[in-house]
Amino acid sequence: MISLFPLRPIQIVDVSFQLLRKRFIKSFFIALCISLPLQTLLWILESSQPSDTNIQGRIVLIIAIVQFFTVGFSLTLCSYLLGKTSGRVYCETIFNNLYQVQKSSARAILALYHVGLHLIFAFGLIGLRYLLGKIVIDTSADVITALTFVIVGVPWIFITLYLGFAAPISTHEGGTFTSIRKRARQINKVHYYKLVGVYCICLFMILVLVIPSLTAIQLILAKNFVTSDVGTIALINLIIAVVIASISAVYSFILTVTYFNARIEYEGFDIAVSIDQTEMEGGMRGKLFDSVA
């Protein structure tokens, strides 16, 4: 059993990985089912680039936008699909099933809402490039869209994390669409930056693990196991899909652990759990004495 006390960011990452190990295969498979189809789409786009330089620049820009969207889409969808899994593992490990996950009809609505925001972001940028192509030359349209992508994309990373707490809240507290969003804002006020710090640590650790994968790609290409450009692009996209799936699976558990850590630090949730456990043990002892008497 993992002790219930306020955690530092590195400890949250450690606990998240401990919990993920209990359901790693299931969590990774679900996350891979989300990231792999999107990476397949990118592989098709990358493999079908025409010789025209202007069109190549446009396609590269669209690929970058879709790749960015893929990460956010995978993180968001996995946080809801794996929310119950990570929640059950946490409750089994920390509370010995004293607390159970809640059923909330708002979960699906919240998931669609957050995924829809990512779709609006991606199609908005692609649509901007299309409209600019009607007004200015292709080179200028690419540059303006790329600058907009950078200016909007960086804050969008933090917005994605900001929206993340809604997933564990809907899993463990339930409520309506409005009440869950209000509750998420309350937790973000006191614990958002810790979530950002935790995610950065996790991302760094996973990127460190990617380095051997890059070495493996170099060895495969050096040995001529993959001889075509299409095969090389497919291999790279497969590895990217695996990395995104790994990040997404961990992210769901990080959200759960960080959510409970916020409640422990600012709401005395650990004290409430201790009281409930004491009352439960007292009730069991009372029943035992009654049966003896």
Image: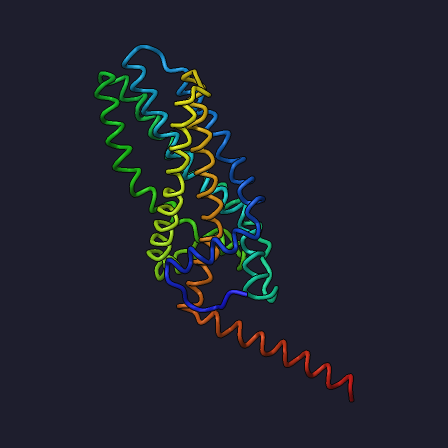
| Drawn side of residue 26 relative to residue 159, left or right | right
Q: Quadrant of residue 81?
A: top right
Q: Quadrant location of the N terminus?
A: bottom right
Which residue is at a point 30% across and 43% down the rendered structure image? 155
Of residues 261 and 10, which is closer to you in this image? 10
Provide residue 26's location: percent of width, then percent of height. 58, 44
> Residue 161 location in percent, x, y?
38, 48
Image location (x, y in percent) of residue 235: 45, 26
Who's the residue at 27% across and 14% down the image? 54
Residue at 30 percent of width and 24 percent of height: 129
Compare residues 99 and 20 and report the one nearer the observer: 20
Decide: is 59 above or below 124: above
Q: Nearer the viewer, residue 140 or 225?
A: 225
Query: Does residue 50 lie above or below 162 as drawn?
Result: above
Among all residues in the image, which is located at the extreme front? Answer: 223
The image shows a total of numbered marks equal to 0
x and y, in percent, of residue 247 in the image = 44, 43
- Residue 179 visible? The answer is no
Q: Is residue 164 left or right of residue 127?
A: right
